[in-house]
Image: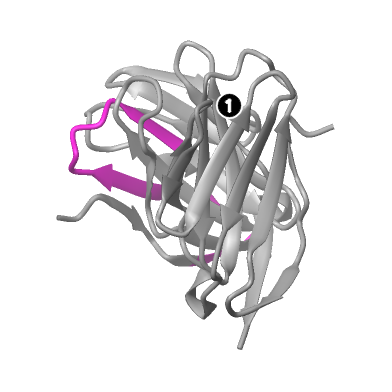
Amino acid sequence: RKEVEQDPGPFNVPEGATVAFNCTYSNSASQSFFWYRQDCRKEPKLLMSVYSSGNEDGRFTAQLNRASQYISLLIRDSKLSDSATYLCVVARGATNKLIFGTGTLLAVQP
Amino acid sequence: NAGVTQTPKFQVLKTGQSMTLQCAQDMNHEYMSWYRQDPGMGLRLIHYSVGAGITDQGEVPNGYNVSRSTTEDFPLRLLSAAPSQTSVYFCASRKEGRGTEAFFGQGTRLTVV
């Protein structure tokens, strides 16, 4: 079982739709949580950090549930430019090693 | 503002050849890492460094060596390339501390034939 699990998708949604991605992690010692975005054949880039209190950045909302070891990402009013792979990432240990999920592919259709 | 510079972008090797993937960052970040990305596997940590002169193994270190003689540079050496090392390699750097953002190089697409 992978330490960080994500549904690989693809999620095919129309423009304007709301879509939610979920992620679970198995190591309760995980300390920091992130969503990264990776466009096709490009490097990953930070989308947002995830906090227990929840956080929002425009159309994007991230939530962390430490008790259930569960992270979510909600995208409202999807745009064509949101099409990408979304990587769930946790950090743990003295050096905050990053552990990546395999990613969820989102395809927003016109 | 270069960030993380990774070279080469593409490389084809024959089985048994050796090569070095270069990675340099200009952000004075303490932490640097090498990952490989394979379909269905996500990014897996090969080696990492928390500062000049300090390196450690990640999840999949076999067949790879690293060194960190300066803060800026973190080269990855393939000792004797094997077809199983065909992958996309990413170098990343970030500041020391919890919750810091990782910045990635553009990746190296390596094919071993």
Answer few, some or many: residues within 10 Å of disc 1's Cα (few below 14, many 20 plus, some between 14 and 19).
Answer: some
Q: Which stretch appears magenta?
A: B11-33
Looking at the rendered structure, the secondary structure element under dot 1 is loop
What's the image's color scheme? one colour
Q: Where residue B47 sits in the image (x, y, percent)?
A: 51, 30
Query: How many numbered dots are placed on residues in this image?
Result: 1
- Between residues B97 and A19, which one lies in front from this camera angle? A19
Q: Where residue B105 sits in the image (x, y, percent)?
A: 37, 53
Image side of residue A103 versus residue A96, left or right: right
Identify the residue at image location x=49%, y=29%: A51
Identify the residue at image location x=65%, y=21%: A66
Q: Which residue is mark 1?
A: B58
Q: Which chain hosts label 1? A: B
| Quarter that holds the C terminus of chain B | bottom right
Image side of residue A42 versus residue B27, left or right: right
Q: Residue furthest right?
A: A1
Residue type, label 1: Gly
